[in-house]
Image (spheres, rainbow, N blue to C red):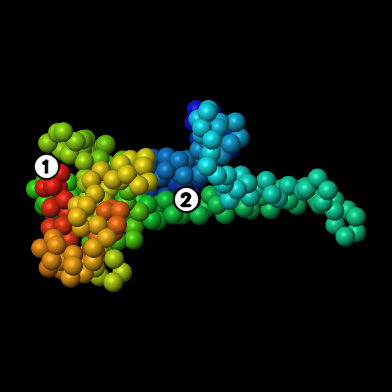
Amino acid sequence: CTKLSASGLVYRHYGKEVLKQYYPALSDELLEVAYLKIYDKLMKALDAIDTGVEQVPDGVEALYRDSTGLSSRVGRLNPRWNEQHEEGNTPDPDARFAEAVKLCEQDFCAVMVGTVESDLPARAFVEDALVKRLETDPSGQIIKFESGGMPWKQHLYELEKIHQLQDDTDKPLIKFVLYTDQSGMWRVQAVTVEGKAFENRLGLPEAWRGVRDQDLAGLCKISTARFVHAAGFIGGADQYEDALEMARVALQQQE
């Protein structure tokens, strides 16, 4: 959005100062990353709603309405047109405003804490895996995390641009990510096309999709392969080497 609401203007001028107050040890680089991520996660939508920017393009009908966002929750604190207390008095707008301020504070702090204490450490792990991608596989299209559960997709898209990865060059985009789940199984997950929820850059082989356990191991000739989702976006194996081999076979079939 190019238009800023009152809250957007306040964030533009004082957002970094607020972050420094809570996290004085942040480097200038990480401060900038956190500042922009918080804007994208929270403030951008508030700016758009407050300045009348439509969520969907003209001529496109929204498939559903979302009334769970901060603006909707703040809006519900406004006294209803016919709301009265039992004694006949109308609600105190100032008291409701104080509730709204508290609600906004809670949301902002939750986004800030999640960004600085979860997203930024995850970004460091993703960048380390990206830098070491050729150690994982010579293709440079597979990266490995030692454990799963952390947010990585948006970091990967951003870091690919910073490190100048692009298909049809000697530095192609990442196609698969390897990590362990809570049970210790190694997962091989396809990277989606940026901006798409379900379209993969490259999926696991169609012949494997929806097949499990011994049937899958016999089909793909990978001994500890355990499953491939019917949509081909994720699979798993007991051993790291076998999960890596599943990704490698998918890359070979692409060629």
Residue occupying the point 34% across, 61% down? 149
Secondary structure under tag 1 reads loop
Looking at the image, which is closer to me, 169 or 44? 169
Looking at the image, which is closer to me, 110 or 26? 110
Residue occupying the point 81% across, 45% down? 81
Q: CA distance from mark 2 to mark 1?
A: 43 Å
147 left or right of 247?
right
Tell me where residue 144 appears, x and y as whole percent.
Answer: 20, 56
Tell me where residue 162 appears, x and y as whole percent.
Answer: 26, 37
Mark nearest the camera among 2 and 1 is: 1
Is residue 51 placed above or below 31 in the rendered structure?
above
Q: Residues within 10 Å of mark 2 (few under 14, many from 20)?
A: many
Res 33 visible: yes
Is residue 28 placed above or below 102 in the rendered structure?
above
Q: Quadrant of the C terminus?
A: top left
Count of marks overlaid on the render: 2
Is residue 167 placed above or below 30 in the rendered structure?
above
Residue marked by disc 1? 255
At label 1, the amino acid type is: Glu
Res 16 visible: no
At label 2, the amino acid type is: Met
Secondary structure under tag 2 reads helix
Residue occupying the point 57% across, 44% down? 65
236 left or right of 24?
left
Disc 2 + disc 1, Cβ < 8 Å: no
Tell me where residue 186 appears, x and y as whole percent.
Answer: 22, 64
Residue marked by disc 2? 112
Tell me where residue 68 appears, x and y as whole percent.
Answer: 58, 51
248 left or right of 25?
left
Q: Residues within 10 Å of mark 1 (few under 14, many from 20)?
A: few
